[in-house]
Structure formats: C-alpha cells, structure tokens
Image (tube, grey):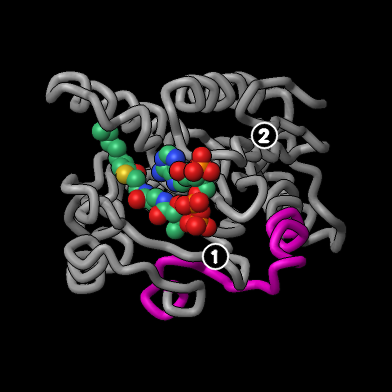
Amino acid sequence: MIVDYENIKFVQEGPVVTLTLSRPAALNALNSDTLIELGQAISSIGAEVHEGVRAVILTGEGKAFVAGADIAEMVGLTRTQAEYFSRRGQAVFAALEALPVPVIAAVNGFALGGGCELALACDFIYAGERAKFGQPEVNLGVIPGFGGTQRLTRLVGRAAASELIYSGRIIDAHEALRIGLVARVLPQDELLSAAMDTALEIAKKGPLAIAAAKILLMDGADIGLERACSMEATAFGATFATDDQTEGMLAFLQKRKPVFKGE
Ligand code: CO8
C-alpha cells in the first residue's frame, strides 16, 4: 500500500511500513507542513496496528536523513511561536515513540539538530556508513528543541551528550556506534535491506510481547530499578493471559513455528 503525502513517502509492504522523509531540496528539513504530515502518518500507523502493521522504518531521501528543523521557517519566529513549534514537534515525536510497534531509524545521511532528535525518538538506529549525527543548534544561537537535550542524554550519558550539544560537533557513523547512539553501522547500500530484515524478524514475534517490552524499556528508564522491575513482573504476568503465550510455548514444545495472532 502506498499513501500520498507531499513531503513523506508512506509505503506498506506486508507487516512493515517505511516512511521516507522526502524534501530533498532542503535536505528533508522539518518545516511545519512536514511535521503535520509526519503526525498524520504516525496516527494512521497507530490506527492500522490491529490490521497487521508490526514495525516501522523511518529513513530519508537523498543525502540526508533530516538536516534539522527548517531554518528558513524558524528565522523570524517570536519567542511564543518558537515555543509552540518546539512543543508541536515534541508532540509528534512523542506520538512516534508511543507507537506500540518498534520504529527503526535507518539513517542514510545527515541527521542533524531536529533530524538527530527524530532518530532518537525511534527505538533504535541503524546508520549507513555515510550517516552524520550532531546537535549543531548552538551554531545558530539556539538549543535542541525537539527533545534532544533529554533523549540524547538518556541514551549516551551526560558526558557524550553535553560534549556534542555544547560543541555542535558532527560525528560519523562509527563514532556514533562507539558512544552507543546507534545499534549498527552498515554499508550504505545494505542499510535499508538490513532494516527491513530486522523489521520482518520482529514481525514474526508475538506483537503483544513486543508492545509490552517497548513500554517497559521506555517507561522503566525514568523510574527507580525496584519499581521498574516490579512493573516488569506485572507485565510478564500479563503475557500469560494472552493466546500468544500459549501458542509460543506450545509451538516450542511441539517443535513447530508459532503463529501469533496478537490476542
Ligand atoms: N533548514 C532549511 N534548509 C536547509 C537546512 C535546514 N535545516 N539544511 C539544509 N538546508 C538547505 C540549504 O539551505 C540548501 O538550500 P539551497 O540549495 O536553496 O541553498 C540545501 O538544503 C542544501 O544544503 P547545503 O547546500 O548546505 O548542502 P551541503 O551539503 O553543503 O551541507 C549540511 C549540508 C552540512 C547539512 C548543511 O546544509 C547544514 O549545515 N545544514 C543545517 C544543519 C543544522 O544546523 N541543523 C539544525 C537546525 S536547528 C534545529 O534542528 C532545531 C530543532 C529544534 C527546533 C525547535 C523549534 C523551535
């Protein structure tokens, strides 16, 4: 299935939706229209999860993933408008993060500023060898505004995050791997197929289990270990109230592949 947006390509192949940011003349920079479309695409995926969407791949067309929020659109914003723009972007990224299926960022090129923040709102990042990451907002006299000060710090720790955010330094895919920003670095021409292979592998698993694990990974990171482990025990118990648990364990014992229904 292909859905038409102006700045985003939405393609569903079986259980996997690929969203491609496609505004190559501005290196896929996020302007208001693109953010609105991204929000619409995310809501439509959320509504289709029960119809069999099991994973999402987010990537960019051309030499950029996303080169940031659109500077030409931001230059004249008032203080109030800038805060509103920041909150609107944060709401879209939060909706992406809250999807009950994994989202893989396949970073094909520049992921700068809001682009790096968009990748950070995904569950994990695969980087092509030409990928570049950074939070260069201080070069423009501003700070990250789409969650970067928070998500980057939570992912790579305060030392690496503060060094990147204060210096505006751009790093390559291998350095991003070293600091734990990305999960894998791939040859450029294998990036999308590797993301698709992983997405299809995820699609074979019990979707309720994946959704439960995603909530625990996200919410558990912000609370104490004891409470987080307690949440895990509750969620673990809840998986035993699903048909998928019975199917998964019986299939193992009967030496066959499970057929999960998400029930
Ligand atoms: N916004 C608007 N246009 C952009 C952006 C952008 N972020 N990035 C690139 N473009 C445009 C260029 O202006 C250029 O347009 P044109 O051809 O009309 O002159 C076109 O894309 C191609 O770019 P370049 O010619 O610069 O390409 P290069 O290969 O020479 O350089 C770079 C690529 C290094 C990526 C360079 O374009 C660059 O430095 N871009 C800006 C990167 C940046 O600073 N990003 C952070 C923006 S701020 C941000 O994201 C804040 C997020 C939070 C917002 C909160 C709301 C208030």
- The answer to whether 81 appears left or right of 251 in the picture is left
Placement of the C terminus among the 4 image quadrants: top right
- The answer to whether 233 appears left or right of 33 in the picture is left
Q: Is residue 196 magenta?
A: yes
Which quarter of the figure has residue 244? top right
Q: Amino acid at mark 1?
A: Ala
259, above or below 186, in the image: above
Label 2 or label 1, whichever comes before in sequence order: 1
Asked if disc 2 is less than 8 Å from ligand 1, the answer is no
Percent of width and height locating residue 182 = 48, 67
Which residue in the protein does label 2 denote? 262
Give the residues drawn in magenta, as a range.
176-197
- The answer to whether 255 appears left or right of 112 in the picture is right
Asked whether the viewer can see residue 156, the reply is: yes
Foreground pick, 226 / 68: 68
Q: Nearer the viewer, mark 2 or mark 1?
A: 1
Which quarter of the figure has residue 262? top right
Q: Residue at the location (82% across, 26% down)? A: 1
Q: Residue at the location (87% across, 58% down)? A: 256
Asked if disc 1 is less than 8 Å from ligand 1, the answer is no
| Figure disc tally | 2
Q: Residues within 10 Å of mark 2 (few under 14, many from 20)?
A: some
Percent of width and height locating residue 55 = 65, 42
Q: Residue at the location (24% across, 25% down)? A: 76
Q: Residue at the location (42% across, 63% down)? A: 133
Q: Residues within 10 Å of mark 1 (few under 14, many from 20)?
A: many
Which secondary structure lies at badge 1?
A: loop
Percent of width and height locating residue 161 = 24, 65
Which residue in the protein does label 1 denote? 131
